[in-house]
Structure formats: structure tokens, C-alpha cells
Amino acid sequence: MLREQKILTLLQEKSPLTIEELAERLLVSEPTVRRDLSAMEEKGLILRPRGAASLPGLGFEPLFDQRQKHNRENKKKIARYAASLISEGEVIALDAGTTNAELAKELLKVSNLTIFTYSLQIAFILSRSKHNVYVIGGQLRKSEQSMVGSIAKDTIRQFNFDRFFMGLAGFNKEQGVTDIILEEVEIKRWIIERSQKTYALADHSKYESSSLVKICDYEAITELITNPIPISAEELGMKGRLTFV
């Protein structure tokens, strides 16, 4: 396919490239780029870090670091508030993503929690902690260092969680909370089903963004924690459940 070859050529020049960058250079829509990248990933031609594409063996760590630096102070504020909600002895689940990575760092300051995660990045951070840490197994998504698939689902079904701290790629009034990676959205939904409370963590840059897949309705979320945004909790459908930090 001619466009596949063009994508590979662009990635040889610079890797990773975001979906937005590829769409701009190829003069096609972002949904078209996503379809091309899905087909190329199936063939093993590329890796798909969150919201981007890279050649195998290149790029996922720099991209994670790049995302972690983006709005980092705001993510730290969200993480500090989220950590304050947790009580000693609780069983919690941490999603993948950079905001949850900041939360994992906050949790190094406390002890006596049982923590489940499907993110190897976050498990590595928590390896220095005094908590009981469990990594949910499954098929490895190399680009994101996360575990997905039916084995992960079977594992999640065996446990109940007091709180789930969930990351997302976008949220708005119309579509609710959304994310990019279908396989990770499935994991989020399964953990929501097994959790007493679900907290959505998203810095203000995620507001008014809409990603590929809807995760859940706002009704499934106990509290949405973000930075100040130009919409009220009532307008968003989150009355009494929207917190600005």
C-alpha cells in the first residue's frame, strides 16, 4: 500500500510521530491514519504508543517521558489530591498513563496498601514501595508496556477493589470520557465493574478532547479530578462529583 510506505518513510526520518503529525504530512484525516496504523500494527510493521506511531524498537520510552513532562505540575496536583483519598489497608487499582505514574510516586510516601496495576511502568515505580503490589498479567502491549487481553480479564474478575484511579485521553459534555487504545479501554471497563469507587484523573488539556473509544458514562464515575476548566459540574453532568485542583 502506497500510504503505508509513506508512513514508514516518515517514521524512518523521525520516530515517534503523532497521529496529528502523520495526518498533516499525508494530507488525510486522523481517522484514516488510525485505520492505516491499526493495519500496520497487525503486520508488525510499527508500534503504537498512545496517540502516535513508532518503528519497532524505537520511541515508546521517549514518548512516555515526553507525555510525563507535559503539564507535569498539574498532574502532580491531581496525584496529590487523589492520594489523599486513600485510606490505609485499602485495595486499589491503578490505570496506565502518566498521571497515574505521578500518583504511584505519591504512594511511595505511605504504606500498607494493596495495589493492582496492568502497567509495567507503574509497577516499576511501586517496586520501591512498602505496599503489596500485584501486576495484572496478559498480553504485553510493547508500545505502552501494559498488559491486556482475556488473561487480564480473567485475573480482574477474581478481585474486588475499593478504588480505581483511571486515566483517560479526553472528556467533554457530549461524548463523556474517552481513550485511544481499545484494548486498554476494555481493561478499564472490567476494573470499573469490580470497583466500589472509580476516579477519573485528567489534567485540563484533556477537556473538550474526544478520542477514539468511549470508556463509560459519567454516571459510572465517583469523582472527576482535573484542573480548573471553563464548565460547571452541572453543565458536565457531574454535580457534586467534579473536583478542581
Image: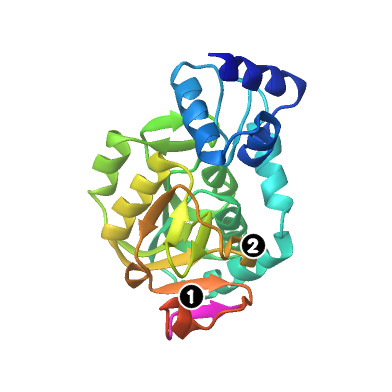
- Residue 205, numbered label: 2
Task: Specify few, some or many for label 1: CA neighbours under 10 Å numbering under 14, 14-19, or 20 or more.
Answer: few
Looking at the picture, tell me which residue is in the foreground, 139 or 202.
202
Task: Judge left or right: residue 190 versus residue 239.
Answer: left
Q: Position of residue 48 (x, y in %)?
A: 55, 31
Task: Judge left or right: residue 105 versus residue 197.
Answer: right
Q: Are marks 1 and 2 in contact (CB under 8 Å)?
A: no
Q: Which residue is mark 1?
A: 85
In this picture, which residue range is highlighted in magenta? 240-244
Looking at the image, which residue is at 62% across and 58% down? 102
Looking at the image, which residue is at 65% across and 70% down? 77
Q: Position of residue 138 (x, y in %)?
A: 36, 33
Q: Position of residue 166 (x, y in %)?
A: 45, 59
Say above or below: 68 vs 137: below
Q: Position of residue 225 (x, y in %)?
A: 53, 72
> What kind of secondary structure does the magenta stretch mostly adopt?
strand
- Residue 45, numbered label: none
On the rendered image, what quadrant is the C terminus found in?
bottom right
